[in-house]
Amino acid sequence: MRTLWLGLVSLIWAQGTIRGSVIDSDGEPVIGAQVLLLPLQKGTLTNPEGLFSFTGVPYGSYRLRITALGIDTIWAEVSIDKRRPVATLKLQATARDIEMQAVEITESLAPTRIDPTRVTVAVTPISPRQVLLLPSFGVPDVAQYLQVLPGVVFTGDQGGQLYIRGGTPIQNLTLLDGAIVYSPFHTLSLFSLFETDLLRQVNVYSAGFGAEYGGRISSVIDIRTRAGDFERLGGRVYATPFVAGASLEGPTYLLRHSSWLVSARQGYIQQATPRLYPYLRDSLPFQFQDLYAKATFGRGPDQIQLFGFRQTDRVDLGPNGLNTWTQWGTGLTFANLPSGTRVRITGNLAYSQFANTFQDPRELRPRYSTIGGFNGGFTFSYLFGADELAYAVEVRGFSTDFLFTNGLGFITQQQQSNTEFAAYGRYLKAFRRQEIGPDGEVRLLTRAVVEPSLRLHFYNTYGYFSIEPRLRAKYTGSHWSLQAAAGRYTQNWVAAVSDRDVVILFQGFLTAPELPANRQLAHPLQEAYHLTFGGEYQLGPTLLALEGWYKRFTQLTIVNRERLFPEDPAFLTEIGYAYGIDLSIRYQSSRWYTYGTYSYQYNRRHDFRQTYFPLWDRRHTANLLMAYRWGGLLTTARLRESRWECSLRWTLGSGLPFTQTLGFFEKLLFLQGSQSPYPSQQGQLAV
């Protein structure tokens, strides 16, 4: 018996791990590639980072076979033993000439197949190719494509705001290569500060996002830019009636496996509108500029990236004032897959700042708001076959400086610094089985994915420790899937403008006030709970998706628009909820691409004095985007495209809520209290 026990122990200890990464010729990860370990006939799939792992492998020599659409089959030899129990492979694929012509046209647009390996409920991936399909206002932009997504409401093109599934702009987290972007859109909201040609991937999490994201209570827009060309020097120049831009990229010849990229864009709408629209009495007073630079060192899983960006906006309203925005940021990201260990390490460190000034000649003091801060962290992840464990630590620090004077002369001013610490853990459990097909090939079938996570967020300024559990899950059948997600979310930031204003050119950022006035609260933070569920059905080349969602805002902070006296509070708290149903359809062939959405949503807010519908409460929204391609193939730097393309976009939205005007009256301003000369004073016209 003792001999048998010792034999089992030695057998268990005589097992190792084979792991690795697969990248393509551009250094991007190959996602969903099948990796087969021979002669054990054991298979797995690469994850979204192009990584794979086999655990519990007996010591010995093996052969790996990696296959995926659009690449040549990769063969690799690997051995593990007592001295080397963990083997790490870093593989690069080469494109398959014939298949790539079809794959790059059809597969690079958008996913039209059910992905059983990931929970995709309330997540919309956007590729640069999708953005370029839009019939554009000057140049295709992410800001324009976001308006096509289900559950998204845009209130206007001049200082208009983006509302995602019942959440306000301040409740949306926008990340650019891990750096926090405080204002992602220009004053003319048809353009963002993200150049489409620089994008690698955009993921929009509209509800129920995991614990890797925190500090916001509604949604996340995670934007990743690509690296510069590692092989050749190249550039791009373009000009449209409203925007012109240029980019340049190439390898860094002094360092191996490194590249750089720079981009600039200038808007000249104010100068172009008098020529294009001579019948307008006034030109559109919008000007903006974007700059971006990036350097990449290393390809594949071992990489360091340095980046920087700058955005400027100017809106000259003549006698009504001058509004200026300035935003800039810089940072680095890194990833390392060390040999001989089972861990993968990633991290980031960034600093960004946003400043907004509004100078009105009729006001004694200019309005201004500045927010700047850093964020950084480390993530440690482990792959166990189809399962993944990740944990991370994060730190954020930011300062705000705000000054605002309302029409009655009351000043709202805040200067404050805050520090936040966070840690999270996430485990992805995939229920996958392996089958041998009639042709002898190994097939991997993933039936279910469960992804619980937990975020611990400490707000140092208020001494509040927030425990935020999250859960995402998916079950996949033969041609269908069911998904669900839920979680608790908190945030510190507060908008210094009212959520009831439609056009917002002056954007202010504040930290949550410590003493909300109209209600006793356990903490000063904004808080929400999410619940979302959905299903997918595969009908040939068509993917149908239906999602229902519910957000409960248990605590919100708003500007007190009814403030009349100095002792009145500057901020109030309110509660609310939002729910809706979103339907989407995707169809894709070698020539046609169709993306249609329909959204129904309902929003209510209660400030303990009244219950109202917020301004973004659009009940029905429908969008249709269609494209047709013909004329053969045209090879570009990164993919093959059709020589000719025609696209169409159609949008229908029901009206936004409003309060009907009952009349006008003269409003007297008692600026001097009881000493005000009200018998002879000329008041303001009020509604």
Image (cartoon, rainbow, N blue to C red):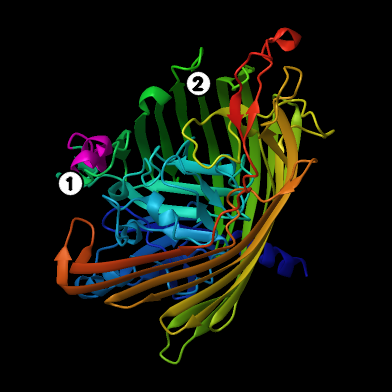
The stretch in magenta equals 253-275
Q: Amino acid at mark 2?
A: Tyr
Q: Is residue 28 magenta?
A: no
Determine if residue 51 is in view. no
| Chain-order first, disc 1 or disc 2 | 1
Foreground residue among 681 and 265: 681
Q: Is residue 267 above or below residue 197?
A: above
Few, some or many residues within 10 Å of mark 1 (<14, 14–19, 20+): few
Q: Quadrant of the N terminus?
A: bottom right
Q: Residue at x 59, y 35 (%)?
A: 394
Looking at the rendered structure, the secondary structure element under dot 2 is strand
Q: Position of residue 254 (x, y in %)?
A: 19, 34
Q: Nearer the viewer, residue 1 or 359?
A: 359
Observer-nearest of 47 and 340? 47
- Nearer the observer: mark 1 or 2; the answer is 2
Circle 2 residue: 368
Q: In x, y percent, where is residue 540?
A: 43, 85
Q: Residue 644's x, y, as percent? A: 18, 68
Q: Residue 275 at what x, y percent from top left?
A: 18, 42
Quadrant of the rendered image containing residue 328: top left
Q: Which mark is residue 125?
A: none
Does the rendering let one see residue 479?
yes
| Residue with the mark numbered 1 | 238
Direction from residue 671 to residue 515 in the image, left or right: right
- Name the residue furthest top: 675
Which residue ends up furthest to the bottom in the rendered image?
438
Per the image, is 260 magenta?
yes
Q: CA distance from mark 1 to mark 2?
A: 35 Å
